[in-house]
Image (tube, rainbow, N blue to C red):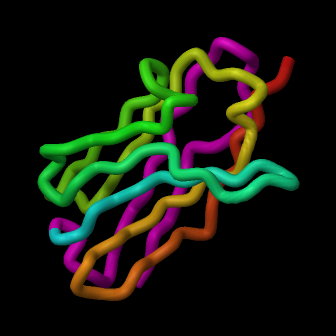
Amino acid sequence: VQLVESGGGLVQPGGSLRLSCAASGFTFSSYKMRWYRQAPGKERELVATITSTGGRINYADSVKGRFTISRDNAKNTVHLQMNSLKPEDTAVYYCNAFSAWGPEYWGQGTQVTVSS
């Protein structure tokens, strides 16, 4: 089983990044997918959730209107489009796969730094 995040980096305030998470080794289309983030010295925070079919999406209040989660079950990928980035968005972003009927999986994380 693997969840591999990519797309992180350094961006100026107001900029955009698109994170991707490539999944393998499990039935991706049966899993709810989530993006979490963890800033230094802070607890891990749930950023966005998308159900297995993509029919229901939820966002943390801190990112509503700026971030968009999407998934492609044919390609076993989930994305997080991040616009209007702020310094407080700086964190390590983690991809998570969750199912009520199976184990939970985590990626290794990708660093996002928003700074001028």
| The N terminus sits in image quarter | bottom left
Name the residue furthest front. 61
Taking the image as shown, residue 54 lies to the left or right of residue 68, namely left
Task: Tell me which residue sits at (48%, 38%) in the image.
Answer: 60
What is the magenta range?
A: 1-29
Give yes or no for residue 7 being in the magenta stretch: yes
Q: Where is residue 42 in the image (x, y as percent from the top left)?
A: 79, 53
Q: Which of 39 and 93 is in front in this view?
A: 39
When the figure is inspected, residue 16 is found, relative to residue 95, above or below; the finding is: above
Q: Which of the 4 image quadrants contains residue 33?
A: bottom left
Q: Where is residue 59 in the image (x, y as percent from the top left)?
A: 41, 37
When the figure is inspected, residue 56 is found, relative to residue 36, above or below; the finding is: above
Give yes or no for residue 50 being in the magenta stretch: no
Q: Which of the 4 image quadrants contains residue 87?
A: top right
Taking the image as shown, residue 27 lies to the left or right of residue 17, namely left
Task: Tell me which residue sits at (41%, 56%) in the image.
Answer: 34
Taking the image as shown, residue 64 lies to the left or right of residue 108, namely left
Could you tell me how many numbered marks the image carries? 0
When the figure is inspected, residue 102 is found, relative to residue 4, above or below; the finding is: below
Task: Tell me which residue sits at (86%, 17%) in the image.
Answer: 116
Task: Tell me which residue sits at (28%, 87%) in the image.
Answer: 102
Q: Position of residue 107 (x, y in %)?
A: 53, 69
When the figure is inspected, residue 81 is found, relative to residue 65, above or below; the finding is: below
